[in-house]
Image (cartoon, helix red, strand yellow):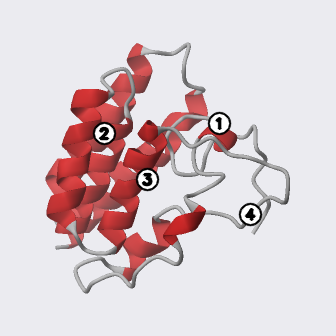
Amino acid sequence: MAKIGRNSPCPCGSGRKHKHCCLHGDRAAGAPARPKARVTASLAKRLPVMPPDPGEGYHWGETELDRLSNSVVDLVREGRFDEADAACEELRVQYTEVHDWLMRKAMVCEARGETELAIEYCERTIAWMDDRPEDFDPESREPFRDDIERLRRSLAGS
């Protein structure tokens, strides 16, 4: 796997630079819990995995927004969907100026098997980015477009 640059768009699809998003996870959290059966292997593979410690002397100042947004990923991995949903709502209420709650809500809906809702939240994430073109590179929408295509294919195959 190619190394992702700190200034590259984050592979999680947030539209933020990698260094401001998933570059450094909460090291205190330890290894993620094994996903419950309702979290498919395919979904678990696509959830962001935090890279190892970048080295001594580097300090990552994780914000409350980062902590809360990343907690949704952890809760989905653990199959704790109601708590993940509550964290999405907390993101929506506390951080109205960012789109994290939309993209995380799509993740929760997909994990629950609510494919149509997951598609809707992916589309709303893209619309959010389209409304703020100065904040997002055009390619930052691609992961969400890919997710929409994949989810629509899964609906057609059901």
Q: Residues within 10 Å of mark 3 (few under 14, many from 20)?
A: some
Q: Residues within 10 Å of mark 1 (few under 14, many from 20)?
A: some
The amino acid sitting under disc 1 is Lys
The numbered disc on residue 101 is: 2
Q: Which residue is the extreme one toward the right? A: 56
Q: Which circle's residue, 4 or 2, is located before the other in the chain?
A: 4
The numbered disc on residue 89 is: none
Residue 78: where, in percent of width, then height? Answer: 31, 75
The amino acid sitting under disc 4 is Asp
The amino acid sitting under disc 2 is Trp
Residue 60: quarter of image: top right
For the residues carrying marks 3 and 1, which lies nearer the camera in this image? 3
Q: Nearer the viewer, residue 155 or 80?
A: 80
Q: Which circle's residue, 4 or 3, is located before the other in the chain?
A: 4
Measure the alpha-carbon separation of dots 4 and 2.
27 Å
Q: Residue at x 85, y 58 (%)?
A: 56
Q: Residue at x 38, y 38 (%)?
A: 100
Residue for badge 3: 70
Measure the alpha-carbon separation of dots 4 and 3.
17 Å
Residue for badge 1: 17
- Left or right: residue 26 versus residue 8 is left
The amino acid sitting under disc 3 is Asn
